[in-house]
């Protein structure tokens, strides 16, 4: 079963205050590390802002399996759809990974692919929520609540079908679920943080340093 991965990195980085994908993380950009983390894929499609296509393509030229760098859209879902157009029709499984998650492990990619092969319509890594949760109206029971990560995995036909309507959602599993698909949660990783604010970059640097040591 042919596996391809779409790495989505077309966001503006408003909360980071700059282009977080190009930020330096121990000698390589965040995006380079996120792409290099991809495991078990025959090919990788990288989606970035229109103005960054040429620069990112140059930076990623030395990485194996990067098939193409394409321009994204106005929303995350639109960017994934742009990536889908570059994934070969013969791909059986498609993973979608955040360009701002540089620390996802090889094992996590393998676990997501295995769950798709076992019959799930959508697979998401999840980490149990440890903080207390509240709505304005009162406390929320956090039991059974997960913080969702990427990579997320899908049978290619299910993902393409969910995106065919042109809808938007915070992640692709939500689109597949709204289209009648069954979502399976696999165990995520505490270290698989998303670079959202400058402090996250510092934490990621410390985690990389400790793993190298």
Image: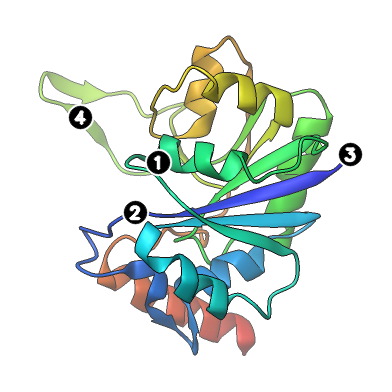
- Residue 11 disc label: 2
Asked if residue 173 lies left or right of residue 186, the reply is: left
Instruction: Please say whether residue 31 is visible from this viewpoint.
Output: yes
Mark 3 or 2 closer to N-term?
3
Q: Would you name the residue on which mark 4 appears?
A: 134
Residue 60 location in percent, x, y? 60, 75
Q: Distance between the residues labelled 3 and 1?
A: 26 Å
Mark 4 or 1 closer to N-term?
1
Q: Which of 117 and 143 is in front in this view?
A: 117
- Residue 1 disc label: 3
Q: Do the residues labelled 2 and 4 touch (CB within 8 Å)?
A: no
Q: How far apart are marks 2 and 4 (CA)?
A: 28 Å
Q: How far apart are marks 3 and 2 (CA)?
A: 30 Å
What's the residue at 68%, 57% (across, down)?
Answer: 44
Q: Distance between the residues labelled 4 and 1?
A: 27 Å
Mark 2 or 1 closer to N-term?
2
Q: Distance between the residues labelled 2 and 1?
A: 7 Å
Mark 2 or 4 closer to N-term?
2
What's the residue at 27%, 24% (across, down)?
Answer: 140
Q: Is mark 2 on a helix, strand or loop?
A: loop
Residue 46 location in percent, x, y? 56, 58
Q: Is mark 1 on a helix, strand or loop?
A: helix
Q: What element carries label 4?
A: strand
- Residue 76 disc label: 1
């Amino acid at each position: 079963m042919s596996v391809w991965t779409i790495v989505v990195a077309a966001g503006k980085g408003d909360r980071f205050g700059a282009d977080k994908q190009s930020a330096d993380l121990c000698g390589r950009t965040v995006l380079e590390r996120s792409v290099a983390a991809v495991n078990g894929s025959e090919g990788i499609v990288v989606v970035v802002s229109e103005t960054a296509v040429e620069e990112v393509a140059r930076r990623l030229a030395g990485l194996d399996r990067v098939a193409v760098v394409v321009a994204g859209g106005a929303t995350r879902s639109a960017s994934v759809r742009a990536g889908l157009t570059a994934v070969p029709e013969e791909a059986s499984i498609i993973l979608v990974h955040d360009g701002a998650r540089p620390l996802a492990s090889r094992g996590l990619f393998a676990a997501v692919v295995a769950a798709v092969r076992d019959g799930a319509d959508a697979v998401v890594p999840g980490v149990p929520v440890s903080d207390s949760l509240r709505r304005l109206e009162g406390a929320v029971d956090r039991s059974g609540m997960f913080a969702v990560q990427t990579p997320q995995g899908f049978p290619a036909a299910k993902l393409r079908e969910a995106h065919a309507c042109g809808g938007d959602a915070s992640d692709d599993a939500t689109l597949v679920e709204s289209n009648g698909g069954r979502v399976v949660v696999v165990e995520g990783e505490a270290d698989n943080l998303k670079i959202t604010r400058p402090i996250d970059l510092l934490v990621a640097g410390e985690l990389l340093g400790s793993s190298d040591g």
